[in-house]
Image: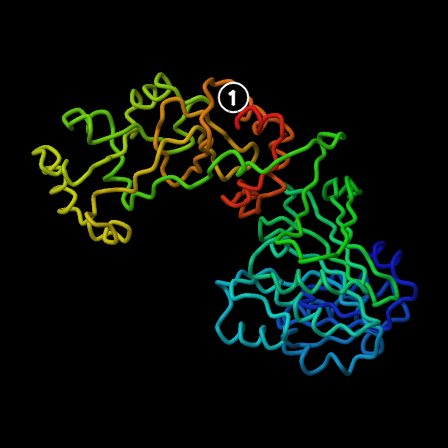
Amino acid sequence: MQKLVEQRLSCPPKAVIDPGAGVGAFTRTALEAWPEANIHAVDINVATLGLLAATPQITSSLPNRVFLHHADFLDWSLHQWAAIPGPRLIWGNPPYTRHQGLTRAAKELAKKASGYLAPGGRAGLSTYFLAASLAHLDPADSLCLLLPSNWLEADYAESLRRYLWSVKERPVELHIFPHALNLFPIASVAAMVLWVGPVNSTVNKLHVIRLKGELGLGFSRAASQEVQREGAPPKSFLFAHTTHSKVRQKTVPLASIARIRRGVATGCNQFFLLTDEQVAKLPDTAYVPAATRLRDIPTDHLDEMAHDTIGARGLRRWLLWLSEQDASDPIVRQLLELGRLKGVPDAYLCSARSPWYVVEKIPAPDLLFGPMSKGQFRLIVNSAKAIPTNTFYGITIRRAPKAAEPIACLASWIRGPAGQDALANASRQHGSGTLKIEPRDLADLQIPIQIAQALD
């Protein structure tokens, strides 16, 4: 980050502001990197500021070059920012606190400090720090922050992306670390560095740099893009890239040939998902094959034999598939009465249905997709015509092919390096490095046109 700033600023900053300075890693680095600058470390935690003040490097610079501010940075930005002579560099790693950990008063202050750039209510503290910093930048100021990367695509940060898309007179760079890298010691989230430079006379492109490397050994550029900031801002700043193919293929979105939807939400899986023993006395019309959990499916082809294997293990593999007429059967009626005794009709989803025991009827999809992964996203060919629960997304080809080969070809591509790379790029990273893709992003997955034509 130091090298990034030094290479891009034509003259060093007069002031460096470290928001949420903590124990001062960025403050100490700034003190050495820009010897003519005043360094302002802002933190609400008096203990960490005390530890910072006690380090010999900082002690020798107090109070002439280093200024320690015991304050909430969001409040400080409203009342103290303007008094700091510029040009200023906002430099550091804002605190990572999820929105659930913020009080109502803290969110109100954050919105006030962010002004017209205030993100949505589900924003974490680091996103509010970013918004407040951007809202207060003077033309000669710049910003270089280490941040979680979820704001690059989250709905709550749309105002920030719109601003960065529109300020073409400022250079903007996104340096994105590898998804699997656990950069933050207290939170398993993907990370990135944002650079926003001073205003200049040039119309600047947005630069997206993807990094490779690891902690301790350093990082280098793996790929880069230049994006013209024209038209409406994209929904995501995780711009698609391809690392496995040097030849650009013609592609179409998956949604052009298939429907993507979540599986059935039963409202009470313990009641609606059944084992072989439980369905033995039920009429055949009362249940259908089900795909319940990804880990229960032994192979990437769920045919009748694989489905039978699930049953042989005593696992739930049938979905109660009742109509009102089925309730007249004495065995079904007995089962429903047992459900009433257990309070199933009072469950949230069940209470919204009429009658409570009739789940949503959907067609069996051609492919079952597991939307969360720590490595490979799984895709399962659904020859058994199982109805998935809502732990899956179902992919149904709009025009069912006469042969199985085109579907197998699509499945093979999605499981392959190009498909997995595209899925990872469209995903969001959650705790412990887990990737999750939303249905709309899966629908936008670009597949080779040759595969699409074979299925259309």
Quarter location, residue 130: bottom right
Between 23 and 408, the one lying in front of the other is 408
The N terminus, quarter of image: bottom right
Picture mark count: 1
Circle 1: is it few (<14), some (14-19), or many (20+) Cα within 10 Å? some
Residue name at image x 29 percent, y 23 percent? 311
Left/right placement of residue 91 relative to residue 316 reads: right
Q: Is residue 262 left or right of residue 312?
A: right
* Mark 1 lies on residue: 408
The residue shown at (14%, 47%) is 340
Image quadrant in which you'd find residue 139 = bottom right
- Residue 44 in the image, given as x and y percentages of width and height: 62, 73
Tell me the kind of residue under disc 1.
Ala
Q: Compared with residue 35, is residue 273 higher up or lower down, i.e. above or below? A: above
8 relative to 433 in the view: left or right: right
Query: Is 10 displayed left or right of 178 in the figure?
Result: right
Q: Secondary structure at mark 1?
A: helix
What colour scheme does the image use?
rainbow
Between 353 and 306, the residue placed more toward the observer is 353
Front-lying residue, 409 or 310: 409
> Measured from the top left, where is residue 63 in percent x and y?
81, 78
Pinpoint residue 252: horizontal percent, then vertical percent. Answer: 61, 36
Task: Choose top left, top right, bottom left or bottom right for residue 18.
Answer: bottom right
Furthest-left residue in this view: 330
Q: Position of residue 392 (x, y in %)?
A: 42, 37
